[in-house]
Image (cartoon, grey):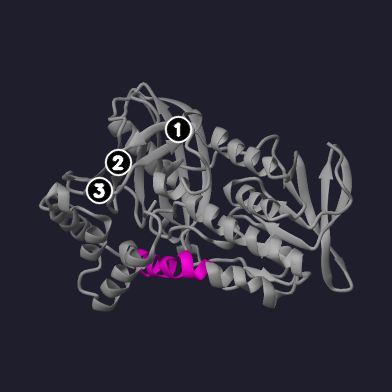
């Protein structure tokens, strides 16, 4: 494919946020180029791969090619060894992210977006104090492509935001240090995700088991950044795996950081927008970001395309993206962030009581709203905010 010298929009990063932003911009008649630094979308996999059906269905037809397993139950494990099953959360999936991300890119291409892989963005191009394009490395050459809008979808480490002068730093408490193994030759329930809580298991976070078959699962841990010293996530995870799955074989290892903050204060400037992890658009409690990224990408893509039609690339116009994001999920994310602060400070006895409470809820009455309302009991204002958040939110908590 011949790369044009100029596009209306250049998207940096071909993950869910970038691909969906490119798709909606192209669908609305903008010319779009996606720059992906790896050899293909979806690698390396840096994700637990769990999503809700209701979250992804609006954006792509469900395809069994990229579904590893269907999830109907979430099992909570308290520090004292008790368990409770959560129902009525809607259908969930554990994905094959490599295949899923490729499918999202194919959809963007179908609507006219161009994709270049192994194209590493190096910097923004500036002319007279204005962003006018992107400098990138491809096939050993340094190249430039001009554009009117750059969409930064380059993940938690987002360089695009920093290049544009956006403050992307978050507190150490608001980023989880994570480790994950894909384990095989283990005994699990294929339709059940499991979560382990407690200060001895994962202080300020949790351990997850997301099944990919009846004998394979993603088993990982997230620790609050300020609590990961002197004992890091790998040590906690190794201890857990040795206890729970002593005969397991590791087929994949992943380390990384996950933002658990509210959305960045600034996600647009003149000629630039940030989406997904780059904008910290992640559920602060679960660390899940795939659905949030797709919603943000769809909004950003539409606004960017409208900006192209009206030839308005200033921050004032692009802020429509921020307004719509806050209406859809941003305000809910702020509530989740306040809840996360409370969760992070819970002691083991409180976790034990929550699981005990869950054990006594009739199966047909169980909901995430019920669970989280119990978790924030004693804080009336937060309880009201939780009720509002669940009322307006269009997606499940994952």
The crowd level at tag 2 (other Cα within 10 Å; few <14, some 14-19, many 20+) is many
Q: Percent from the top left, x then y, of residue 295?
A: 52, 56
Q: Percent from the top left, x then y, of residue 13?
A: 67, 49
Marks 1 and 3 sit apart, C-alpha to C-alpha, by 20 Å
Callout 1: SS:
strand
- The range drawn in magenta is 325-340
On whether residue 332 falls in the magenta region, the answer is yes
Along the polypeptide, which appears first: circle 1 or circle 2? 1
Q: Residue at x 70, y 61 (%)?
A: 305
Is residue 178 among the parts visible in the rendering?
yes
From the image, tell me which residue sits under label 3.
88
Front disc: 1 or 2 = 1
Q: Residue at x 63, y 70 (%)?
A: 167
From the image, tell me which residue sits under label 1.
67
Residue 268 image label: none
Is residue 89 positioned above or below 388 on the image?
Answer: above
On whether residue 331 falls in the magenta region, the answer is yes
Q: Residue at x 29, y 54 (%)?
A: 199
Q: Percent from the top left, x then y, of residue 243?
A: 28, 33
Along the polypeptide, which appears first: circle 3 or circle 2? 3
Marks 3 and 2 sit apart, C-alpha to C-alpha, by 15 Å
Q: Nearer the viewer, residue 301 or 241?
A: 301
Along the polypeptide, which appears first: circle 1 or circle 3? 1
Marks 1 and 2 sit apart, C-alpha to C-alpha, by 18 Å
Would residue 237 be found to the left or right of residue 36 on screen? left
Residue 194 image label: 2
The crowd level at tag 1 (other Cα within 10 Å; few <14, some 14-19, many 20+) is some
Q: Percent from the top left, x then y, of residue 37?
A: 72, 43
Q: Residue at x 39, y 53 (%)?
A: 286
């Amino acid at each position: 494919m011949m790369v044009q010298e100029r596009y209306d929009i250049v998207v940096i990063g071909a993950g869910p946020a970038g691909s969906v932003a490119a798709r909606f911009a192209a669908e609305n008649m903008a010319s779009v180029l996606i720059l992906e630094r790896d050899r293909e979308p979806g690698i390396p996999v840096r994700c637990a791969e769990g999503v809700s059906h209701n979250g992804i269905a609006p954006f792509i037809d469900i395809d069994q090619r990229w579904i590893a397993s269907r999830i109907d139950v979430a099992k909570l494990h308290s520090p004292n060894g008790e368990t409770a099953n959560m129902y009525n959360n809607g259908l969930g999936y554990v994905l094959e992210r490599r295949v899923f991300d490729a499918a999202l890119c194919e959809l963007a291409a179908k609507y006219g977006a161009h994709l270049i892989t192994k194209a590493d963005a190096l910097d923004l191009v500036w002319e007279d104090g204005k962003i006018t394009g992107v400098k990138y490395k491809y096939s050993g050459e340094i190249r430039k492509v001009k554009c009117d809008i750059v969409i930064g979808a380059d993940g938690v480490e987002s360089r695009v935001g920093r290049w544009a002068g956006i403050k992307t730093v978050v507190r150490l408490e608001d980023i989880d240090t994570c480790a994950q193994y894909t384990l095989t030759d283990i005994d699990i329930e294929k339709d059940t995700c499991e979560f382990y809580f407690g200060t001895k298991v994962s202080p300020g976070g949790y351990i997850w088991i997301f099944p990919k078959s009846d004998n394979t699962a993603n088993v990982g841990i997230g620790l609050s950044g300020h609590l990961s010293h002197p004992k890091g996530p790998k040590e906690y995870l190794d201890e857990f795996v040795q206890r729970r799955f002593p005969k397991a074989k590791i087929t994949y290892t992943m380390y990384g950081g996950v933002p658990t903050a509210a959305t960045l204060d600034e996600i647009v400037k003149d000629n630039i927008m940030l989406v997904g992890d780059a904008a910290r658009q992640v559920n602060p409690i679960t660390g899940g970001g795939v659905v949030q990224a797709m919603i943000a990408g769809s909004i950003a893509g539409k606004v960017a395309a409208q900006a192209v039609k009206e030839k308005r690339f200033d921050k004032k116009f692009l802020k429509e993206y921020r307004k719509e994001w806050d209406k859809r999920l941003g305000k809910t994310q702020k509530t989740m962030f306040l809840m996360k602060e409370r969760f992070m400070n819970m002691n083991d006895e409180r976790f034990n009581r929550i699981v005990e409470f869950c054990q006594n809820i009739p199966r047909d009455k169980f909901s995430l709203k019920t669970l989280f309302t119990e978790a924030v009991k004693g804080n009336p204002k937060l309880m009201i905010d939780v009720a509002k958040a669940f009322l307006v939110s269009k997606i499940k908590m994952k």
